[in-house]
Image: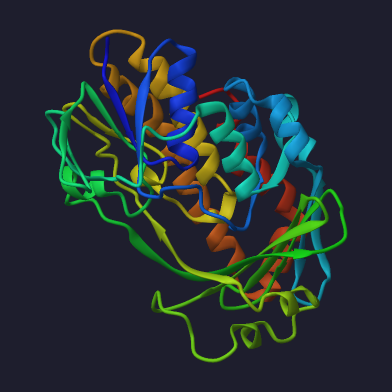
Amino acid sequence: MTRVLIAGAGIAGLATRIALAARGVRADVAERDLAPRAGGTGLYLPANAVRALGDLGLADRLATRSVPVGRQEIRDRTGDLLTSYGLDEIWGDVGESRAISRAALHDLLLDAAGPPTFPGNAVQSARPDGTVVFADGSRAGYDVVIGADGIDSAVRRSVFPSVAPRFLGQVCWRFLFDGTESTTWSVLLGDRGRSVLTVPVGNGRVYCFASIDSATPSPPPGDWRELFAGFATDVLQHGDNAYFAPLYEIAGFDWVDGKVVLLGDAAHACSPSMAQGGAMALEDALVLAASIGDGPDALNRYRDRRAARVRFVLEQNHRRDNARNLPGVVRRLVFRHLGRRLVRSNHAGLLARP
C-alpha cells in the first residue's frame, strides 16, 4: 500500500484527501492547528471550481451551503457601467458559478475528508526521499509527501528553497458584512489599481475585496478606506475589522522532487484577479489523485499535465491586471467595446476538464 502524507488541511489538502480516498488511497494529514480556524472571509467559485467540487462528489453539499452567481458587472469608480454579462455567456456548458464563505467551504470539505491525522503537528520539513520532520520533532517516512500547506509552505521551503513568492505590487482588504442578497458579482475600478468588489455568499452575507497598487507589502498608514474616497459605494463602512494582505505569486514550476510534490498555493499561488486560486487547488487534487493511481512516474505526470493550465492562468491574471490598470479613458473604451470578448478569452483555456 502506498503511504501518503498531506501537509496542510486547507482547501487543497482536504480536497486531495477526498480525491485519493475515492481511488482507494488512504492519506495521513498533518495540520498545524488543533481545530478548524473560526472566521475567514468569502470565495467566488468560478464554474471550473464548481465543476471540480462536483467531480469530488460534493455538488449536493455545495448547493446547500453556497449561492449561485449569475452575472458580473464592471463599473468605473463613479458607478458608471462599463460592461456586464451573464456568466453562462463565459462558461457555457461548464455550468454555474457560485459563492460561499471560506468557513463554509472548509467545513464542507472537512465533513467529507474527515479530521486530520496529526492535528496541531504540522510538517516542519521534508526531504525528496519521503522523510518528514514534524513540529514535535518526530520523523516518519512516506512514499508520497504532498505539500498542500499554502503560500508559506514549509515543504516548499525545505525541498525547493530557490522557489519563493513574488510580491505583485498590490495589497488588499477583505471582509464580510450583512447585505442584500443578489446573484451579481460587481466591481468598481479606479486609478492606481484601486478596486472594490462585492459578491453575495449566502445567509444574508456579502464578501468585499478592496485592493490598491502598493510599492511595499506593508499596510499604509491611517484608515485604509480613505484610499477609496470618491468610490460610489458605502460598503467600506463595514470594513472596521477587514483582513489586510499583500498579494503574491509563485510562477515557478518546480513542483516535484523525488517523492515530494506541491499543489495549490504551495506550488502556484496567483493573483486573485480571476478567482482561480481555489479552482486550481481543486483541479490539482483531482489530477494528482488520478496520476497516483496510474502507475510509476505519477508525480512527474501530474506536473506535466498541470503546467500548461497553470501557466495559462498566470498569464491571464497578468492580462486582466494590466487591463484594469489602463488609464481611465482608455479602460472605459476597452471594457465598453471589448469587455465581454476579453473575459471570454481569459477563461477559454479553462472550459475543458483539466
- The residue under the point 61% across, 49% down is 103
Task: Give how far across and how far down residue 42 sits, in percent.
Answer: 64, 54
In the displayed structure, 254 sits above or below 316; it is above
In the figure, is residue 99 to the left or right of 8?
A: right
In the displayed structure, 202 sits above or below 353; it is below
> Which quadrant holds the N terminus?
top left
Nearest the eye: 170 or 221: 221
In the displayed structure, 122 sits above or below 166; it is above
* Quadrant of the rendered image containing residue 287: top left
Nearest the eye: 116 or 73: 116
* Quadrant of the rendered image containing residue 51: top right
- The residue under the point 27% across, 14% down is 2
* Quadrant of the rendered image containing residue 73: bottom right
In the figure, is residue 161 to the left or right of 121?
A: left
Nearest the eye: 242 or 275: 242
Task: Look at the image and tell me whether residue 131 can be seen.
Answer: no
Nearest the eye: 107 or 194: 107
Task: Give how far across and how far down residue 161 sits, in percent.
Answer: 17, 50
Task: Look at the image and tell me whether residue 166 can be seen.
Answer: yes
Task: Give how far across and how far down residue 262 sits, in percent.
Answer: 31, 37
- The residue under the point 60% across, 88% down is 223
